[in-house]
């Protein structure tokens, strides 16, 4: 079912087929976004359920100014933020990236060549845990941009729409996130490289 058919189906008297199509297309991706932000499987599942409940309740209000996927990601992101705020476990900065041009990002102290195939990374538990820990150590603002752009593969424009920030802010945050991750992972991959050589 194409997006136009889904959107028309959502606004019909029988929205079940359209909701099912949206669920099949986006549920896993929304779950991974929520899990990446919340680090709680049950909470991530709740966010996905609440997202589709919200879609059903607000289906007549969707104007189609963005894609259905962007709309779903925005709902899931907001629900995840609400859960984070209610737990008050993480500060949620309100920076829009505007000051970033005046505050240069320090370069990592050590750059190491660390390439891998995604399949190899998933199979290697130690690498996966190290990567997950590094992603979780990012600030919520950087983590959200990284997850949406590099994990979920949304465009810069879609990410900006989901997070309600400018495309410039998305680019700056993504750059910062990648630099922080590279620095945090450099020592791990340097040790891996030395171990492989010996």
Image: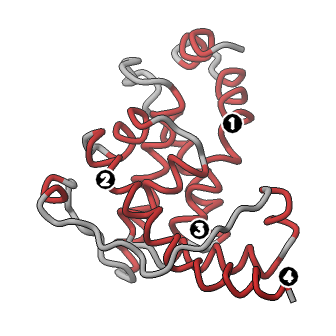
Q: CA distance from mark 3 to mark 2?
A: 29 Å
Q: Secondary structure at mark 3?
A: helix
Residue drawn at 43 percent across, 34 percent down: 158
Q: Earlier in the sequence, mark 2 or mark 1?
A: 1
Q: Is residue 49 left or right of residue 181?
A: right
Q: Which residue is tagged 4?
A: 196
**Which label sits on residue 172?**
2
Question: Which numbered disc, 2 or 4, marks the residue closer to the eye?
Answer: 4
Count of marks placed on residues: 4
Question: Which numbered disc, 1 or 4, marks the residue closer to the eye?
Answer: 4
- For residue 43, what is the image quadrant? bottom right
Circles 3 and 1, Cβ within 8 Å, touching? The answer is: no
Badge 2 local density, few (<14 within 10 Å), some, or many (20+)? Answer: many
Badge 3 local density, few (<14 within 10 Å), some, or many (20+)? Answer: some
Q: CA distance from mark 2 to mark 4?
A: 35 Å
Q: CA distance from mark 2 to mark 1?
A: 32 Å
Q: CA distance from mark 4 to mark 3?
A: 39 Å
Of residues 183 and 18, the one drawn nearer to the viewer in this rendering: 183
**71 w.r.t. 4: above or below:** below
Where, quadrant-wise, is the N terminus in this rendering? top right
Q: CA distance from mark 1 to mark 4?
A: 43 Å
Q: Position of residue 92 (x, y in %)?
A: 29, 70
């Amino acid at each position: 079912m194409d997006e136009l058919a889904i959107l028309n189906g959502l606004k019909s008297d029988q929205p079940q087929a359209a909701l099912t199509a949206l669920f099949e297309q986006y549920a896993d991706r929304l779950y991974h976004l929520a899990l990446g932000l919340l680090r709680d499987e049950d909470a991530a599942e709740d966010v996905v359920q609440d997202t589709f409940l919200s879609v059903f309740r607000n289906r007549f209000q969707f104007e189609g100014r963005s894609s259905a996927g962007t709309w779903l990601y925005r709902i899931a992101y907001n629900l995840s933020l609400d859960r984070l705020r209610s737990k008050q476990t993480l500060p949620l900065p309100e920076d829009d990236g505007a000051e970033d041009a005046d505050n240069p990002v320090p370069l990592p102290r050590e750059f190491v060549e660390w390439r891998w195939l995604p399949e190899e990374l998933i199979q290697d538990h130690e690498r996966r845990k190290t990567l997950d820990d590094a992603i979780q150590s990012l600030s919520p603002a950087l983590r959200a941009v990284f997850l949406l752009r590099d994990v979920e593969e949304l465009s810069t424009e879609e990410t900006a729409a989901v997070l309600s920030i400018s495309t410039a802010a998305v680019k700056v945050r993504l750059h910062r996130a990648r630099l922080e991750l590279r620095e945090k992972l450099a020592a791990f991959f340097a040790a891996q490289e030395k171990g492989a050589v010996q």
